[in-house]
Amino acid sequence: MPDSDSLALLERALDQTGAIIDRVRLDQASLPTPCTEWNVRQLINHTVYDLHVFTSMVTGAERGSPDADLIGADWSAAYRQAADALLREWRQRGTAGTMKSRIGELPATWAVGQHYADIAMHGWDVAVATGQSTIQGLDPDLGQASLDWARENLKPQLRGKAFGPEVEAPQQAPVYDRLAAFFGRQAR
């Protein structure tokens, strides 16, 4: 996939999840999510943490603590700041070559795919938890690209706490429900 295509998918994932987070109300903070270990606030904080981790992956910087409160009282602003930083670093670096990760040396294009798939998945998680539509308003091409990336790259040895075993989903289910099932989430 050309550099511009994969970075365009990343930007779409960042924007889509940002729009979902923008619609979350503070009184929804303690609602449960498809990520059973987190409520809505914790999941949004985790998503922002992921953006920081992804940025450190691109820049080679040290990772911060997963226990830090990264979103404070303005979840949308914290998300947007982290999303903008990630996209800026990817645009500066480009997607050529390889990069180091905790699982070894990987093509940079693999990492971009991981980033947009993860962000799209967490957007779905937040949407489900807060009663937002997971059909209308979600980018079906992004959902399909994320599902394609996951099917090709999310091997059994990478599953565990973050990604549970694949859950059965009907082939005619909406693409984000199939993506969620592949990532081990129970569809609605």
Image (tube, grey):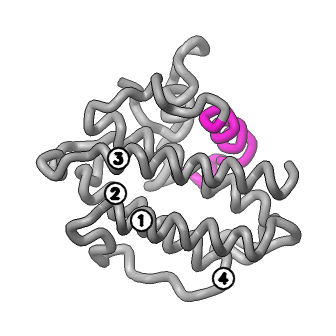
> Residue 129, image x and y in percent?
28, 38
Q: CA distance from mark 4 to mark 1?
A: 17 Å
Instruction: Name the element at disc 2.
Output: helix
Q: Which residue is mark 4?
A: 59
Q: Quick check: marks 2 and 1 in contact, CB under 8 Å?
A: yes
Instruction: Name the mark on residue 35.
Output: 3
Residue at x 70% of width, y 59% of height: 112
Quick one: label 4 or label 1, which is nearer the N terminus? 1
Between residue 72 and residue 152, name the one nearer to us.
Answer: 72
Callout 4 amino acid: Thr
In this rendering, the answer to whether 140 lies above or below 74 is above
Residue 59, x across and y down, in percent: 66, 82
Question: Within 10 angstroms of label 1, few (less than 14), some, or many (20 or more) residues?
Answer: many
Q: Residue at x 66, y 32 (%)?
A: 141
Q: Secondary structure at mark 3?
A: loop
> Residue 66 in magenta?
no
Q: Which residue is mark 2?
A: 44
**C-alpha span from label 2 to label 1:** 6 Å
Give me the C-alpha separation between circle 2 and circle 3.
Answer: 11 Å
Q: Is residue 167 visible?
A: no
Report the disc number at residue 48.
1
Viewer-proximal residue, 116 or 63? 116
State how far apart marks 3 and 4 are (Cα). 28 Å
Task: Using the numbered discs, state the Cα–Cα distance from disc 2 to disc 4 in whole angstroms.
Answer: 23 Å
Q: Residues within 10 Å of mark 3 (few under 14, many from 20)?
A: many
